[in-house]
Amino acid sequence: LIKEVADSASISEAQARSFLSALVRRGKEENYSIQAYPLIPLFGERIVFLPSAILYGNWPMIQQRLIAKKISDIRDRRQTKRVRTVFEKRNFRHLESDIVIKDHEEKPLTDLDVVIVSNDFKEVLVLQLKSFIAEDSLLKTEKADDHIADALRQCTVATLNLNSVRHAIQSKMNLVLHPDWKLRQLIIVEHSAGIGSHSGEYPVVSIAWLESEVGSKEIYQTIEEIWRAGLELPDAADFFNSIEPSFSLLCNQGLFLEQKFAIYGYSSPHSS
C-alpha cells in the first residue's frame, strides 16, 4: 500500500508512510468522523478501509476540519512552550508535558497538560491549558465556557485519583515523590475564561499573568505560593457586585441560556 501510494502520488515511500499513518484510527480520534481517519488497524499488520468514507464524504469540509485541527495543535504546542519557559527560568528542574492518568485497568482517566515538580519533590503543580480561542462572538464565549468546564472536570478527576496521578508522574518523570506530597492545579487560558462561574479550588489565570507575575518577579518562591497567588486574584463577579447600583442585569432564560448581561445606561450632558 505504501508503495502504491508513493507511486500514484509521485512522493517518496517515507512520505507515503507518514501520510498513511496520519489516516489510521488508533483510539484517540472518536470525536472525528470515519472520513478523517478511514483506516482501521487489524492484527497481522493489516488494515481495513471503509468505502463509505468516499461515498458519503464531504471532502471540502473534511479538509477544513483537518486544517483547523492542525492549527489548533500548533497553537497548543506554542502555548505549552510559553508555560514551560516560565518555570524553566525560575529553575524548576522537573517539568513534563502530556502525562496520561490511567486507572487500575490501564484505562485513561484524564491527562495532565503540564506538570511541574518542586526540587524537593514535596509539591506538584499541574497546569491545564484551555480556551485558546478568540472570543469574538457569543458562540465562542460559550465554547470558552465549555473548555473551562472540561478543565475543571480534569482537575476533579486528578484530585479523586491521587494514587494514579502519583504513579503516572513518577513513571513518566523517573522520580520519586515525597510521601507527603501535595497536588496543586491551575487552569491556564490565553485571554478569557468565558462568563461562567468557576471553582475556587482550581484557579483560572491567563498565560499573560503567569508570564508577568511568576516569570518576571521573584516574590513567588514555591509552588504553593504560585497556586495561592492565582487563588487570591480578584474575581470579576465580585467587581460587578460592588458596582451593582451602576447597571441593571438582563436575564434572558431563552436565548442566552440563563446568562446575565450588564446593561449600562449613558445620559447626554445636553439632555433636558
Image (cartoon, rainbow, N blue to C red):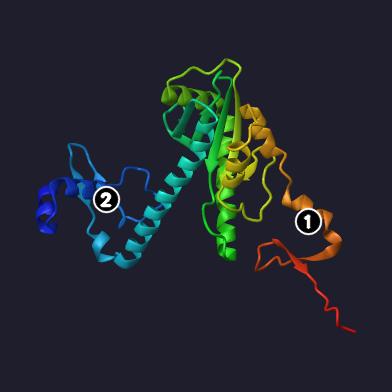
| Residue 114 visible somewhere in the drawing | yes
Q: Residue 206 at what x, y percent from top left?
A: 60, 47
- Residue 23: image tag: 2
Give residue 179's position: percent from left, percent from top: 57, 15
N-terminal label among 2 and 1: 2
The local crowd at label 1, few if under 14, some if 14 to 19, many if 20 or more residues have their Cα within 10 Å, is few
Occupied quadrant, residue 217: top right
Q: Which residue is mark 1?
A: 240
Q: Residue furthest bottom?
A: 272
| Viewer-side residue, 8 vs 157 | 8
- The crowding category of the residue bearing disc 2, from other C-alpha atoms within 10 Å (few below 14, some 14 to 19, many at least 20), is some
Question: In terms of secondary structure, where does tag 2 sit?
Answer: loop
What kind of residue is marked 1? Phe
Look at the picture and state if 168 lies above or below 39: above
Q: Which one is nearer the viewer's eye here, 210 or 224?
A: 210
Quarter of the image with the C terminus is bottom right
**Residue displayed at 32% across by 67% down:** 60
Q: Are marks 2 and 1 in contact (CB under 8 Å)?
A: no
Please, what secondary structure does the residue beneath circle 1 have?
helix
Q: Which percent across, then down, holds residue 26?
A: 31, 43
Disc ID at residue 87:
none
Q: Is residue 179 above or below residue 166?
A: above
State the residue in front, 209 or 131: 209
Q: Is residue 102 visible?
A: no
Front: mark 2 or 1:
1
